[in-house]
Image: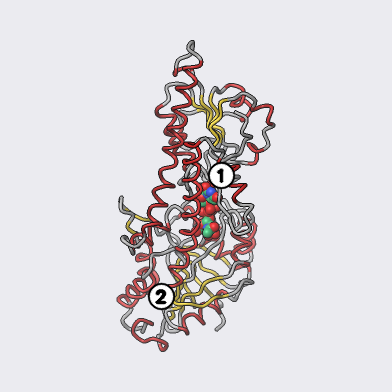
Amino acid sequence: MKFNTISVVGLGYIGLPTAAVFASRKVKVIGVDVNQHAIETINKGEVHIVEPDLDMVVHAAVKEGYLRATSQPEPAEAFLIAVPTPFKGDNHEPDLSYIESAAKSIAPVLSRGNLVVLESTSPVGATEQMAAWLAEARPDLSFPQDAGEDSDIRIAHCPERVLPGHVIRELVSNDRVIGGMTPKCSEAASNLYGVFLQGQCVVTTARTAEMCKLTENSFRDVNIAFANELSIICDKLDINVWELIRLANRHPRVNILQPGPGVGGHCIAVDPWFIVSSAPSEAQLISTARKVNDGKPLWVQEKVKLAIADFLQANSDRTAADVTIACYGLAFKPDIDDLRESPALQIAKGLFATHPGPVLMVEPNVKALPRSLAQAELATLEKALESADIHVLLVDHKQFKAVSPELLEGKLIIDSRGCWPENH
Ligand code: SAJ
């Protein structure tokens, strides 16, 4: 099946790059979003999100007339839904309301032979739920859950696994899991991604595809939790956890990840909860890992408070109000400007709210602090190294790794990423 026109619903971190890559292969792409600013930005050939090379691909696609953004769905041969799937409440229940509204918005323009792909990271069963919403809205059409291989509409779940900052390249090169509700649905979805994919299309069921994405990120979260727990144990046993992990990883079959100040971003810290929500009594390790990782920011803050107490004990002429703390890094991971869901930002905000003295923020990837830290000072690396009494390393940005060891000599450092030499 050839696809001349496709529609991508949801033009965010995944939808827009996906739309642009299809358009770069001369497929007409109708991008649909509820955000008028995003629509206007894209139709000017510009982008509203930060992702290397994306502006170039979007600009060319819009200029050549292959990509257009709108707020209302229009007929197309295939529809890709890439809308948010957050969780809600304290027990992390998956929120499928965005998928529901996207499904209901495309239902009126569906026609026989169309393919609908759910790309959003979703709890197991979400694709079937989407198919039910579509069937309810269009009783004149048949769907895989009732008509099987003879369905008018083909439906699949095809999750993405691209790394933020490398999206354009990984969209094309990564293998893609294709979870059709029937084999014919998988075949249609494989044909669709075959337009640009250089990786392999790996066919499975919709439920397995949903679980696969959640498994990939839960695997990483559990392994990060192991590293974080090691860091807490080593602190208690007065062992350098960075040295310990380096030594253990010399074993040919051991690969322990790196401890940090917690787990940020809107994927690794979110997706495991979808599994826990589907199997709360079985998902023991996965939910415990989430608690270990979510507990790390508070542990780092406690370490800083102990360091302040030690500092005041050693400097009786000083009071807490004149102790300057510097927080190095606010982003959720190294060398990016994304502060969303960042444990480093959580720690910096916590220290700023509780420490009576000055708290300097050093974040080389932003020009201004977020509103939540509007009253704080965005300081240069040089100023912080020079004027702070306590140095809290939260993100291993390349600028911090490049600080020469002599500048750190004798400084009181809390290093949550093992970025600076153990010389304090
Ligand atoms: N982190 C550690 N220690 C580590 C590795 C990561 O503390 O050893 C922290 C990072 O600092 C960050 C968080 O974990 O705060 C997540 O960072 P990440 O680089 O692991 O993940 P993301 O969110 O940028 O991308 C992940 C990737 N998934 C996997 O590596 C299994 C990516 O392939 C997914 O597509 C993406 O989640 C997603 O969108 O699901």
Colour convention: secondary structure
Residue located 38% across and 60% down the image: 274
Q: Amino acid at mark 1?
A: Asp
Quarter holding the N terminus is bottom right
In the rendered structure, which disc, 2 or 1, sits on the residue that comes first in sequence?
Answer: 2
Residue located 61% across and 57% down the image: 166
Q: Which residue matches tag 1?
A: 337
| Location of residue 372 by image quarter | top left
- The vertical placement of 375 against 24, above or below, is above
Between 256 and 89, which is closer to the camera in this rendering? 256
Q: Amino acid at mark 2?
A: Val
Q: Is residue 166 visible?
A: yes
Between 120 and 400, which is closer to the camera in this rendering? 400
Q: Is residue 49 visible?
A: no
Residue 284 lies, in percent from the top left, at 36, 57
Residue 268 lies, in percent from the top left, at 47, 54
In the rendered view, does 139 fall on the left or right side of 29? Answer: left
The single residue placed furthest to the top in the displayed view is: 317
Q: Nearer the viewer, mark 2 or mark 1?
A: 1
Mark 2 and mark 1: Cα distance apart in space? 38 Å
Q: Which residue matches tag 2?
A: 109
- The vertical placement of 329 against 281, above or below, is above
Q: Of helix, strand and loop, which one carries label 1?
A: loop
Residue located 43% across and 58% down the image: 271
